[in-house]
Image: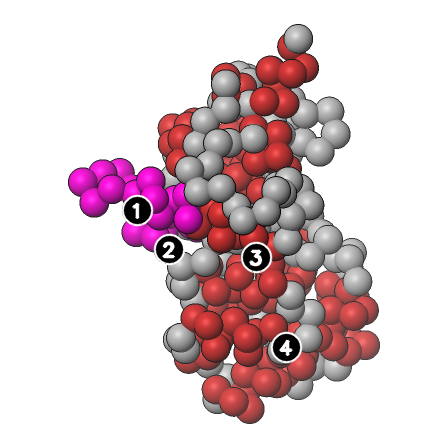
Amino acid sequence: MSDTIATIYRILQRHFGSNPTWWPIFGDDAPFEMLLGAVLVQQTRWETVEQAILRLRDAGLLRVHALAQADTGELAPLLRPAAFHTQKAPGLIAISAYICTHYAGSTAAMLARPTAPLRQELLGLPRIGPETADVVLLYAGEHPVFVVDDYTRRLFGRVHPTVHTPPPTRFTWERARYNIVQKQIEQELTAAATPADAETPNQTGLYADYHALINEVCVRYCLARNPRCDGPPARRVYSIQEGRESYLERHDGCPLRDICAFYQARRT
């Protein structure tokens, strides 16, 4: 009953629609705010990050130069209860100072660099690993890289989509190396794209939209424990962004049930 990665995208898009402003922005420097959010959301629910972002804004620290000069002891409490907030505080200060020193405080200027060297540069900064680097590249810098997070691994591990380009070695979505999963998804989506398909966004838009849809279906239906395959979706409100509450009125089941290997196995 499984289907392709491209099919999964179409089904999720029909169910949830597309939201070009999916990432909530509260300040006037979106690239910098996205970078902060990408670091803070590690091991943390987004609603916790959003509240921390709002506290930073209210404290005048949602600006690169201001955060670069912040005191760790004063910053850390503003980030609580984000996981590892005492470690993330000095990391964010160091990242901000780096942007000030090397790019005159312009995160956008840094993100305008070519993808490959920029990714390596991001990976050299504190608190930034492959997933966080790719979140920053995709959303803040609009670079065409697919983000592989726990939601991605969980969803594809359960739906178990067929692939046209077999990986060089046997792997499972949940445990394969980050770059192998990322390459597999990008290859499948590239192969499925057709210029005549007016509904398909450009590559960067496709990757951002797909990642957002994966997050939505995993927050609403494909929960790690006690998944809500047959509905209703979880009524979790994880952003005060206008329009997010529209999903809460749904009472149907997961739109991927018909092609999900996990769901079909549970029924037998």
Q: Residues within 10 Å of mark 3 (few under 14, many from 20)?
A: few
Q: Are marks 4 and 3 in contact (CB under 8 Å)?
A: no
Where does residue 249 sit, x and y in percent of width and height? 52, 23
Q: Identify the residue under disc 1.
A: 201
Q: Secondary structure at mark 1?
A: loop
Q: Is residue 131 above or below residue 170?
A: below
Disc 4 residue type (three-letter): Leu
Instruction: Choose the circle earlier in sequence order: 4 or 3.
Output: 4
Label number found at residue 166: none
Disc 1 residue type (three-letter): Pro
Q: Residue at x 47, y 68 (%)?
A: 31
Instruction: Choose the circle earlier in sequence order: 4 or 2.
Output: 4
Disc 2 residue type (three-letter): Thr
Q: Identify the residue under disc 2.
A: 204
Q: CA distance from mark 1 to mark 3?
A: 23 Å
Q: Secondary structure at mark 4?
A: loop
Q: Residues within 10 Å of mark 4 (few under 14, many from 20)?
A: some
Q: Residues within 10 Å of mark 2 (few under 14, many from 20)?
A: some
Where does residue 127 sit, x and y in percent of width and height? 69, 70
Q: CA distance from mark 2 to mark 3?
A: 18 Å
Label number found at residue 179: 3
Residue 134 is at least partly visible in this image = yes
Where does residue 149 sit, x and y in percent of width and height? 61, 49
> In the image, which residues are magenta?
187-211
